[in-house]
Amino acid sequence: MRYDLFSSRRNQTYTFSTARNDSSGMKPHTLTQNIGHADLSYLLYDGNGPTVIMLHATGFLPWLWHPIARKLSPSYRVLAPYLCSHREGDLVKGSIQWKLLAEDLTIFCERLHIEAPLMVGHSMGGTVATLTHTVFGVQSKGMVLIEPVFLPRRFYGLELSADDSYAAQAMRRKNSWRDTEDAREYLKSRNLFKNWDEEVLELYLRYGMQERKTGTLELVCSPKQEAALFTGARFYDPWPHLPEILCPVLVIEGEQSEVRNFIDFSKVAATFRHGHHTVVKDAGHLLPMERPEECADIISNFFDTIHRNITGQT
């Protein structure tokens, strides 16, 4: 599919086969970058093309981008920062504001001399990418926002507590397993994980959990930390900034996502100057984890079109 990136908006529903195309075993470099007050960890996939920054959802981690980044990396240089652990917070000490994460990402780009990157953001990551561009001036060449959390405007500025639905869910999250097999069995029994791609689930088990001194496993991003990230969503309203973004933006949503009940993603796409919107059939809010091959194809096609337009290639 070719996108007319700077004129009409396109709405398209994608259906893909489940065939796999890659089993290269490629592993990224695991690095850290000091951003003044902390070290920000990130994955680096070497590539010969433009730089892509991939930003994960609340409570998750950059390794879950691996199947997608691996497919992009021959043609793109991919960086995936870990936004969960470099700032501490909980519902007592205070929320971790998403605007603050955007400021941290801006410093990250400055320290690594990254200018005009392409950006991919999922859920929280989509909002952080947007704020990085609009509030702090990291001018992206193009963005793919996968179910970005732009809340209804009445919610911004409200005081939140542990009773907030998503924060409350995070606080109740199970955080102890005997071993990896126990964790795997548990995750596969939960609706949140039941449709995950097998490789992505194994990546979550390997990198999203850590061993305690007792030998049991716990989440790398603790329930308290995740809850602090969820409540950080409502401190800054991004809606006034969306029309200011001049680069092409693709908004992707899952056909079965519960988030569609309170965020109209077609409206989000229409708010951008050069916004595009697509729906992935039979996918939920966590569609990068459920359908990584499909996401990789959509992202690659969109960014390839941008790159051709910039370089004048046909």
Image (cartoon, helix red, strand yellow):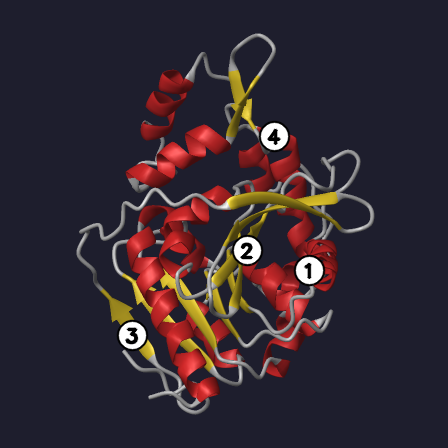
Q: Nearer the viewer, mark 4 or mark 2?
A: 2
User: Dot 2 lies on which element?
Assistant: strand
Q: Amino acid at mark 2?
A: Leu
Q: Are marks 1 and 2 in contact (CB under 8 Å)?
A: yes
Residue type at mark 1: give it: Leu
- Specify the label residue 79 is tagged with: 2
| In this view, the mark in front (4 or 1) | 1
What is the spatial separation of the Cα atoms under label 4 and label 2, in whole angstroms? 24 Å
217 or 269: nearer the viewer: 217
Task: Of the two numbered discs 3 and 2 on the same chain, state the one appearing first in sequence.
Answer: 3
Instruction: Read off the residue under disc 1.
Output: 112
The three-letter code of the residue at mark 4 reads Ser
Q: Helix, strand or loop at disc 4?
A: loop
Image coordinates for residue 93, horizontal then vertical, percent: 80, 36
The alpha-carbon separation of the residues under discs 1 and 3 comes to 36 Å
Spatial separation of the CA atoms under disc 4 and disc 3: 37 Å
Mark 4 Cα shell of 10 Å, populated few (<14), some (14-19), many (≥20):
many
- The quarter holding residue 277 reads bottom left
Tell me the number on the disc at residue 222. 4
Q: Nearer the viewer, residue 124 or 265?
A: 124
- Residue 27 visible from this viewpoint: yes
Residue beneath disc 3: 12
Name the N-terminal-most of marks 1 and 3: 3
